[in-house]
Image: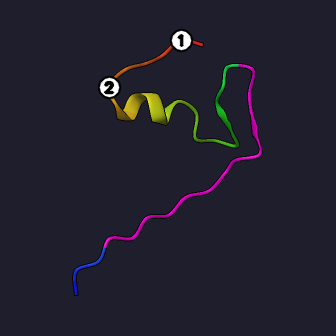
Amino acid sequence: PKATIWCGDIDDELTAKGYIVPGLGDAGDLAYGVKVQM
């Protein structure tokens, strides 16, 4: 059968630059081809 599975999570904190702690960094900005300066 064809199925779409969505998964998510809420991170507890961000760095002063708005990066997810721990580790994911600016992947959200880069996924859309634009680097946003915070």
Indicate the position of residue 25 as horizontal and vertical percent values: 58, 33
Q: Residue at x 75, y 20 (%)?
A: 16
Q: Residue at x 37, y 20 (%)?
A: 34
Left or right, 12 with reference to 18:
right
Q: Residue at x 32, y 25 (%)?
A: 33
Q: Which mark is residue 22?
A: none
Mark 1 neighbour density, 10 Å: few (under 14) some (14–19) many (20 or more): few
State yes or no: residue 38 in magenta: no
Indicate the position of residue 11 as horizontal and vertical percent values: 70, 47
Left or right, 33 with reference to 11:
left
Determine which residue is flagged by label 1: 37
Q: What stretch of residues is rendered in magenta? A: 4-16
Quarter in which the C terminus is drawn: top right
Q: Residue at x 62, y 56 (%)?
A: 9
Q: Is residue 28 above or below residue 1?
A: above
Q: Which element is circle 1 on?
A: loop
Indicate the position of residue 23 as horizontal and vertical percent values: 63, 41
Q: Which mark is residue 33?
A: 2
Indicate the position of residue 7 as horizontal and vertical percent values: 50, 64
Dominant secondary structure (helix, strand or loop) of the stretch shown in magenta: loop
